[in-house]
Image (cartoon, grey):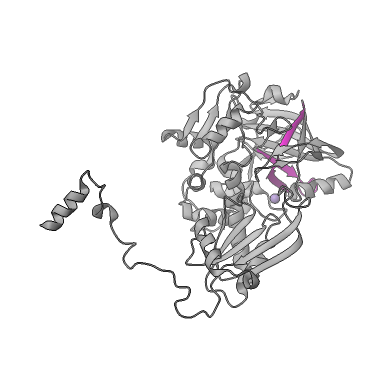
Amino acid sequence: MSTTARDVRSPDPTQVDTVPPGADLRGWLEHLRKDGRLSVTAPDLDLTFGVAGLANRMDGSTATVFPRPGGHSVPVLSGLLSRRSWMAEACGVAEDALVARFDDACRNPRPWHEVTGALCQEVVHDDVDLTSLLPIPTHNEHDSGAYITAGLLIARRPDTGVQNVSIHRLQVSGPDRLGALLLPRHTLALFDDAERGGEDLELAIAIGTDPLTLMASQAIVPLGQDELEIAGALHGRPLDVVRCRTNEVRVPASAEIVLEGRLLADVREEEGPFGEFPQYYGERARRHVIAVDAVTHRRAPLFHTIVGGGTEHLLLGGIPREASFLSHLRRSFPCVRDVHLSRGGVCRYHLYVQVDRPAPGEARNVVLGALATHYDIKHVTVVDTDVDVHDPTEVEWAVATRFQADRDLVTVHGTQGSKLDPSTADGIGSKLGFDATVPPGTTGMRYTRIRVPGEEELDVASLVRPAAAGWHEHLTASSGR
Ligand code: MN
């Protein structure tokens, strides 16, 4: 493999020195299979609800392959990364190093390496009929129809060639037409620029990418930073990309399936409803439209689907956000030690922040800083280092015993929030912060957590056994001797 001058970087101690297990999709599936973490379902499950229902039932236990879904020759795949520990494993690091590893990749991206001739272009279809080419499932009860949910939408600025990667829900609206929800982030910014000039925006949609590229697509980094370069950093080597056949977009060369197309200027069509990560339906509205110009894929491709609101969906957004938020907060607040996006807060809305002895007033500044890191963050809770920030019960305990609303509540109204939070007014709503830290300057035993000396060190297995029948008499007999 050739490298460019931009690839040369000094060695970094946080880099993994072997190819991580998640660097290749089929390799990852084989990795999971070896210790019983890959299931194959009965064939011919219904593409409408049948695949999604079983995917939900298997959520968090194994990855699952669905052969002949709806009689289709292309199998569906779900649940590749449905545990935090699996994501760490895919990256080749311990679970407690996952967030740091991801943050390191965001700070030290690796430019991609362009190849000609790629697996993702082994088979080419210029005549596009999406539902006959691909097994696209319908997930939830009130969804408007079939949706592509695990497609990495790669858009490219025509003037600079800089790319952006993100995942959007994509409704099958016609044989070569998709409806897309573009939330107010990077894809929309690129499209708005193109549309102002009367131009369509060229893009590609990569389905069935390796797990590290899938994770990288969710990085919260500035517009202008290509998430495929973060994928390269997670891989420990530049990501191989290939130019699309009908446009200038570069896509991961090993993707299972690639749709090439354009976001259409001055076209909006009905899209939705669709079951989303907050476990509600995103409503039907006139939204952006993608024309698909070509479909390419590997021989015998796999079609990845992510069912809305499942663990894979939540964690894929959650882990990269934790990495970005921790890094962002530490820049402004040296007291910040760790962060966690809770499952109950759909890994988006509820951020817990752990701080070490904040100065008077500082915990409230941490709240304000945290609320400003991403519009999705709605409720922030700040806790001390004696509270396990990754355990929601611990955080609730801190709120229960260290928080007083008249003193410790931060409220900000009329702010931008998540449009997918049904309690907002089209995304406009309130933010709350809970300072659940012990007030600075507190003395004495008032907030000292109870503990039994020596409890943690006890070897319970050697000291305790199940009670046998007649245990009471035995006790009496024993005590009598
Ligand atoms: Mn971006």
Of residues 319 and 458, the one nearer the viewer is: 458
The part of the image, by quadrant, that contains residue 136 is top right
The N terminus lies in quadrant: top right
Image: 355 above or below 240: below
Of residues 300 and 426, the one nearer the viewer is: 426
The C terminus lies in quadrant: bottom left
Where is residue 89 shown, x and y percent of the image?
Answer: 47, 46
- Judged by its main secondary structure, the magenta piece is strand
Say left or right for 196 vs 111: right
The part of the image, by quadrant, that contains residue 354 is bottom right
Of residues 316 and 414, the one nearer the viewer is: 414
Q: Is residue 173 magenta?
A: yes
Say left or right for 224 vs 326: right
Q: Which residues are magenta?
A: 151-174
Where is residue 190 shown, x and y percent of the image?
Answer: 79, 48
Q: Is residue 70 magenta?
A: no
Where is residue 191 shown, x and y percent of the image?
Answer: 80, 45
The part of the image, by quadrant, that contains residue 141 is top right
